[in-house]
Every structure is written in C-alpha cells, then in structure tokens.
Amino acid sequence: MSRSKDASGPGSQEPDRQEMARFDVGALKLARVYAQAILESADKKGCRADVIGELGRIVREVLPKVPGAAAVFSSPRVPADDKAALLDRLFAKSVVPTTLHSLQVLARHGRLEVLPQVLEAVERLADELDGRRQATFTTAVPLDATEQERIKTEFERQLGLSLSATFHVDPELLGGLVARIDDTVYDHSVATGLVRLGEKLKQRSIHEIQHRRDRLGTA
C-alpha cells in the first residue's frame, strides 16, 4: 500500500524536529530532567559508566549510520509502540537494561528526538557529580591521544581542577592552542610546557598551510 503525500502542498516540508530541539531552550531543560532520572536509575543499579558509554555509542556511532532509524525516532507520526519495538530490535541484546529502559521511556513520552541533548546533559551531570569541569581544547592541527592527554594533564595541574576534555581542530587558529573551561578562555601561556607545545602546534599549522600552497602551485 502506497502512502499518500502531505496534503499541505508541494512546497511544504515537515520541520526537522531534531534540529528544532537543538536550539530549543525548553528542550534543553527537559533533557536535563531526563538526564537526572537516567543517572539516578543507573547509580541505583551500579551501571552509570555502562549507560553513559552506551548512550554515547548509540548517538554518535549507531544512529548516524542508520538514518532511517533516526527519522523514525523523531517522527511524530510513528506510534510510540512502534518506536519501542524498533528499540528492542536494535539494542536489547547490546546494552544493559537501564540503557534500554531509558530509551523506552523517551519513546513512550514521544521525546526520542531530544536523545542527543539528553546524552549531553547526562555527561555534564555526571561530570558535575564527580567534581569534573567541562573543558574544550581547540588546536590548529589534529593531536594524537598522547598529546591530548598531555594538554589535559598540564591544565589540571596548573589550575588544580579535574577536567572532562573535548578536542576540536581549527586550521585557522594561529595561536596553536586555546582552551575554554566553563566560561573562561585560556591560551597556551597558562603553563610553560604549553608555551612550547603551542609554538610547536603553530609551526605545524604553518608548515601544513605552506605544503598545501606548494601542492596547488605544482598542480
């Protein structure tokens, strides 16, 4: 049986609920409420790390590879029971019961489209409970795991904080390294060791830019 097209006209499109939720302050507050409930449930079962890891894998690795599933989860036209059945088929054998239950609750309440925001809220709340601060490091060139750990450790030592670190790359960043911890921005001058690393990253960035120009000139 073929499905009829939306009768609202050929030029109309259904709003992207996931994109709307991304910028909806109400959705972010709601995500924090769900995140609190998920963490409380996970802590009672002693599986917080499993739940956070599995939700992260689902949001960042599984759903991007299964766009059809993401569309079903975000569609208000798909009954909650159908979404729950899909969740069972996809994840029942690969996640702990608390993770699956959390997904089922979101499905029953018609809130699966805010799953990425729920994950962010879960990770942030877990960091707060463990005394970690959110840190975002931006570098001009990609870093390997050893370099990332060195930067994180040096900032923790200098600031006396425990950090949860995320790394991004911005090729236009001439200073080599910029860190944002909560609402405070630091450059690589925060520590002597980072001055040297920042200069090293800056030189690597300049070298890569020059290399690209040379290749273009040869072509």
Image (tube, rainbow, N blue to C red):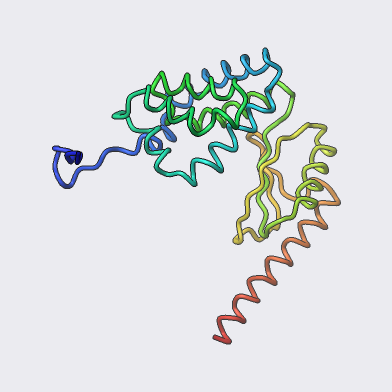
> What count of labels does the image hold?
0
Q: In the image shown, does 138 or 12 lie closer to the viewer?
A: 12
Residue 95 lies, in percent from the top left, at 60, 29
Q: Quadrant of residue 27?
A: top left
Residue at (61, 75) in percent of width and height: 212
- Horizontally, residue 196 falls left or right of residue 111, namely right
- Horizontally, residue 124 falls left or right of residue 89, namely right
Q: Quadrant of residue 219?
A: bottom right
Q: In the image shown, does 158 or 114 lie closer to the viewer?
A: 114
Judged from this view, the residue extending furthest toward the bottom is: 218
Residue 121 lies, in percent from the top left, at 57, 27
Q: In the image shown, does 24 or 59 lie closer to the viewer?
A: 59
Judged from this view, the residue extending furthest toward the top is: 44
Residue 94 lies, in percent from the top left, at 60, 32
Residue at (52, 19) in percent of width and height: 34
- Horizontally, residue 30 falls left or right of residue 173, namely left
Q: Quadrant of the N terminus?
A: top left
Residue at (69, 45) in percent of width and height: 179
Residue at (32, 29) in percent of width and height: 78
Q: In the image shown, does 187 or 77 lie closer to the viewer?
A: 77
Q: Is residue 77 above or below residue 40?
A: below
Q: Is residue 138 above or below residue 29?
A: below
